[in-house]
Image (cartoon, coloured by chain):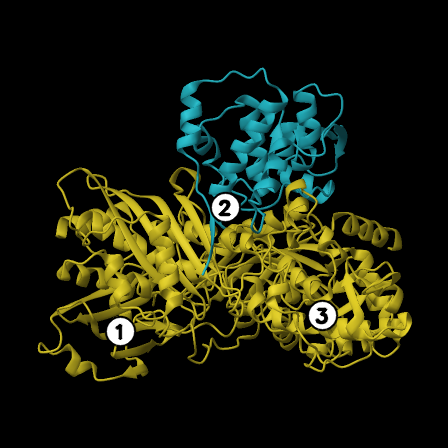
Amino acid sequence: MSARSSEAIKSASKSSPRSERPSRAIDRRDFLKAGGALIVGFSSAGMMADKLFAQGPPFMRMPGPDPRQLDTWLAVHSDNTATVYIGYVELGQGSTTSLLQVSAEELDFDLSQVSTVRVDTSISPNQGGTYSSSAIARGSPAIRQAAAEARQVLLKMASQRLGAPVEQLTVAKGVVSVIGASGKSVTYGELIGDKRFDVEITGKAPLKPVAEYTLVGSRPPRNDIPAKVRGTFTYLQHVRLPGMLHGRIVRPRGQGAYGAGAKVKSLDETSIAHIPAARVLRKGDFVGVVAPREWDAVRAARDLKIEWDMPATLPGSDDVYAAMRAEQTVDRVVLQRGDVATAFSAANAAHTASGTYHGPYQAHACFGPNGALADVRADSALLICSSQDVYTTRGTVARLLGMKPEQVRAEYYEGSGTYGHSCYDDSAQAAAILSQLAGKPVRLQFMRWDEHGWDPYGAAHVGEVRIAADANGKLVAYQYDGWQHNWAAVESSEQLALGTPAAEWRLGMAQQVNPSQCGGMYDIPNIKLINHQVDGLKYLKAAWLRSPLDLAFSFASEQTLDELARMLRMDAYAFRRMNIANERWRGVLDAVAEASKWVPRPPASRVSDAKIVQGHGIALGTHLTSYGGAVAEVEVNKETGAVAVKHLYGAIDAGLAVNPAFIENQISGQLVQAASRMLLEEVTFNKTNVTSLDWNSYPILRFEECPKVTPICVQRLDQRSTGAGEEVMAATAGAIACAFFDATGVRMTEFPLTPKRVLAALRKS
Amino acid sequence: MASKLKLRVNGVTREVDSAPDTPLLYVLTDEMHLQGPRFGCGLSQCGSCSVLLDGAEIRSCVTPVSAVNGKSVTTLEGLPQWYAEQKTLAKAPELHPIQQAVIDEQAVQCGYCYNGLIVKAAELLSKNTRPSDRQIREAMNGHLCRCGTYPRMMRAIRRASEMMRDAHSGAETTAADETELAANATGDSAEVAR
């Protein structure tokens, strides 16, 4: 066993990315041991589960690191480098590098002198999940403050060592020198080298003035890319544990109604007798297979004869909107300002436009299906997963295993991009159940149909919008009624294994009509937003998918605005601009208009009988905080119904951009992904279950369809940093729909804009 | 008992323990612990598992290991060496030009699809050192990227093409290609201070 462990250690160390030097993880462990009080730091990069468990369960019952302690956030080493402990996970957005820029800036270190370790519930501060584009928005203030506190402590130590007051000290690359006294210097490493700070964060350490920033706002390259390009980066899918089995789940191909789940009607274990190494594991209606060899597990899951009981109660994807609209709903006025009824009256509203719009269920469709590794022992468990929120995942897995959260250690390994709550919790739970049943470590890998078929999708939406303007083009009234259901609160693994009834999240932000996205960017004196909450148990399970619901809101709202602009014979850009007072909204709108060399004209004023027609559209978008704008240039073939997005321009104002290059990459990705969602993506299902189970039945945008993209990062040094991973999604959705309207004079009422749907809309017009 | 299957992987001959019907992907990942090829769909739809078989890109997730017995497999990890052999260089470079170009363009987001994107682009560039925009799109169309990094990958392929031309200046050029390359610049980014 020890030989295998050390081999695993070697391969893990060799393959770790530069930013996550395993030696540092071990340093931290030793360093914490040396400090005596807090022995929590272990990383599987340096130590395998077996050795970890040899320490005994009390070891696992340590609380998470104390966020008030400076030592929780960073450690300065003898070689004058630092390890920064970050509670947010890297999802390919570059946030790890950005947060290292922030810490190095504040400490006056070079970027090369700081690194981090992987997120782990036994090491990392619990900063909450990495969602709502939070890594920089919430992560950077905490890390900036911790670094500033450390700098203060180090300067005091240097002051004593050098015999000079703090005011006369200056720092560069972690070397403290006395101003005007050449040669008098000491490094941070010499001052504290691997010893604990042992101080609490005061929140009072002065922060470096923005004007003095040299690293923050600059564009160093991402530290994870070289390993990803060489093939040496360790994704979750590469991690192996000694003595483990390969596991696969066995479920119906495609989920059914969330509330109904799936019941095993019959299961014939002899059907996999031809794979003697494989075992069937079952807990309630949760079924899986394990085998020492991966291919045996894949074959066993494929060949196992099992019949499922699934009720035929779904409306089917063709009838889902009518079904939702007809539901008894729980209604809530999200926002009411002024008097909408009076404002819509003829005396006040010279022009009124309205429409009913539909947005489908869409999948996260992670490129690498989710998975997890679990080693569940009698009284403790190790979980290796790609959760965006390892602390929450730890809690739900602990409940499932009948343990306390402290008995479960969850460690994060990056998987493929997840764009929200994909199957990472479901697969983590499944791995834990399989390991508990098998009595061995299990590596669970979802298959493609598991990921596509059992994803908690972005919810389907029906929107009814009505907007009015006066004769001068000033917006006077806005009403939005939205129908959708909430997110799934119980994962399918738990539902199947324990029979836990399906349940939804309580209504909250990002599950309901969004005041920021529905009219929020425009100055409208009279506004009413009403949420109609549908019972989600009768539908597919849902969760947050990048900019939840906002694409559908923008699709409805921005097209209706363009209909008004057409009535007013006003240019779409000018019409929006005159209805915006906020300079940051104007900023992104102007940025995309300028970049695209916007030529003003009323929407749909150039509609022709040509077979192939072109149009442009402009729209705004947000998720919760930052400001997004987009322009789309599209071409429509009226004979085939094909829509080609030719060029997209996107701008984000996310306040202080720590690394503008990363934001540009995020914008480019959002432009392309939003185009994919508007043109191609929809989950299909019949009355029993989901039928879009792979890349053929759930197509996404490809190289040949990819538009040109122009990303614009609006840098605002005087504003706090906010998220930049979502805002251009909704703006792009609106811009593409408006561009289609401009080209054809027809408003699409449902996306994606597939040829069939486009031809039907053109024929109807 | 039949003799074991043998593969030449990144220049080293390896014996295979797995059953002959095992997809090559699982041999490369589970037996040889390679981290280039990776599971994406198991259906030959996405390109996540791509490797070069005697220089041609194949999907290892649907290729039984018995079908490649005795053949030469190159994975992402082996591209620099493979490139050196192609170009008869004395020594393998640190990175294949397309790998360097992907870093230079900072093209990656999550990077999971980049095994397939890089392997496919390396195959393309080995056959056509000056691919046009249309040829790039056609060649790469069977590879998906969920993060939407296609525009940057296209830039990286053009950059690698230029790097290879600079290194081996004998390549032929045509005016039509040049125009198309210039006309299809995939996008400019801008940082605006407000």
Circle 1 chain: A
Same chain for mark 1 and mark 2? The answer is no
**Would residue B60 be visible to someone looking at this image?**
no
Label 3: how many Cα within 10 Å (few below 14, some 14–19, many 20+)? many
Q: Colour of chain B?
A: cyan
Horizontally, is B22 left or right of A637 in the view? right
Residue bearing mark 2:
B149
The image position of residue A25, as x and y in percent, is 80, 62
Residue bearing mark 3:
A147
- Give the structural element (helix, strand or loop) at label 3: helix
Q: Colour of chain A?
A: yellow
Circle 3 chain: A
Question: What's under tag 2, amino acid-wise?
Answer: Thr
Q: Is residue A362 above or below residue A155?
A: above
Q: CA distance from mark 1 to mark 2?
A: 34 Å
Task: Name the one closer to the observer, A478 or A513.
Answer: A478
**Would residue A628 be visible to someone looking at this image?**
yes
Question: What's under tag 1, amino acid-wise?
Answer: Tyr
* Disc number placed over residue A531 in the picture, else none: none
Residue bearing mark 1:
A480
Question: What's under tag 3, amino acid-wise?
Answer: Ala
Task: Name the one closer to the observer, A647 or A549.
Answer: A647
Which residue is depicted at the point 45% across and 76% down?
A: A504
